[in-house]
Amino acid sequence: CMKILHIENGRNLYGGPQQVLYLTNGLKGRGIINVVVCQPGSLLSIKLKESGIEVINLACRGEWDIFYLLRLVRVIQSEKPDIIHAHSRKGADFLGGLASRFLSKKSVLSRRVDSIEPKFISSLIYGLFNKVIAISENIFQIILSQNIDEKKVSLIRSSVKTSVFDNQRNRDYVNKLYGISKNDFVLVAIGQLIPRKGYPCLINVMFSLNKIYPNMKLLIFGKGKMEASLKNLVTKKKLEKNVMFCGYSSILDEFLTHFDLMVHPAKNEGLGVSVLKASAAGLPVVAYDVGGVPEVVLDGVTGLLAKPDNQDQFKKNIEYLYKNKDFRDSCAQAGKQRMIDHFKVEEMINKHIRLYENTINER
């Protein structure tokens, strides 16, 4: 029976950790043993334990945490996995690769971000692993541009479980929870409050739109180091009644379908799991044409894309969807169908199993 040791150091259940949860549950259903090394107290740790998946909590303080490396080596020696799968950065990639190489273990790395490092760093990290997984075509091409052997790289897109949106909480519950009235048009943004997610642009767009459409509300779900500065910007623009910071919500999937539109102002994006979820929940998406986003959002079909840094076009796209309900409904249906057709969890799991088997059998 195959045994996989996964490493994921994300604290909240954002894109990467969410995929680890999908993957390990799916692998467990196929009789594959999973052990997940993750941060103590992380939401992923809690959810995995609820699913009956073995968790080992190791605190990691970054790329150069030698104590983490030593503890990780001991865990791998004790667990004796067939494959080590590193899912995140923050130490999981470099230190996970070092531990694997030191113990001569077969290893796989998932690459989820579309930032470009110096080639010597990429060569160093990717050289530690037998295989590298790109979660989007965009990331696949970035990895190849770093002079990594194409035979070493596999494209396995992130996925979304559409069935989670079948049973939603009551709309009145959501309205009461967030102070929404029945006449409000509600935009939702989901993601970490960090620079590359582009939230200052979104708040400026809301400032322009609210002058014309005072019933437009924006709910921002996420946490991060920019939270204080973004709240100050909202106060400065006098948008406190129209822009709400909702923190991280572990139950967002239970009422996501009740919002009107997903706005995703990211300047860089590997693929965008929150965009996958929004489409699966039947929300049209307004986003920038960056990274892997156009692989998810078909412009004019499941939502509208603006050219990078074209804030005016981003605003006009929101306005167009606000005014055109038929187009919104069409995007909603097309988005749902696209997720069912191209981003199935089952397909993602099957591809991982084939990759694991090939890696184990490779000499």
Image (spheres, grey):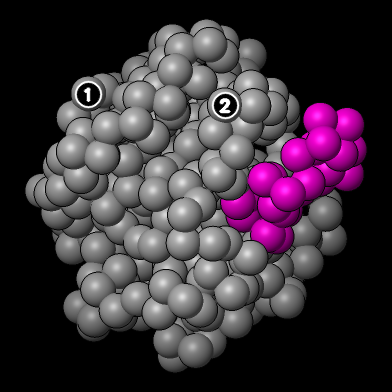
283 versus 72 height, above or below: above
SS label for mark 1: loop
| Residue at point 44%, 18% (across, down) | 316
Write the residue at 88% across / 44% down. Answer: 228
Residue 226 is marked as: none
**Residue 229: within the magenta?**
yes
| Residue 67: % across, % down | 84, 60
Circle 1 residues within 10 Å: few <14, some 14–19, many ≥20: few
Q: Quadrant of residue 213?
A: top right
Q: Is residue 19 left or right of residue 211?
A: left
Q: Which residue is mark 2?
A: 212
Foreground residue among 140 and 308: 308
342 left or right of 274 in image: left
Disc 1 residue type? Answer: Gly
Confirm whether residue 84 shows in the render. no
Q: Which residue is mark 1?
A: 300
The amino acid beneath tag 2 is Ile
**Is residue 61 visible in this depiction of the protein?**
yes
Residue range corresponding to the magenta coloring:
219-247
Closer to the chain start, of discs 1 and 2, is 2
Quadrant of the rendered image containing residue 231 = top right
x, y (%) of residue 140? 34, 26
Residue 148, relative to residue 91: is it above or below? above
Out of 274 and 347, give the one closest to the viewer.
274
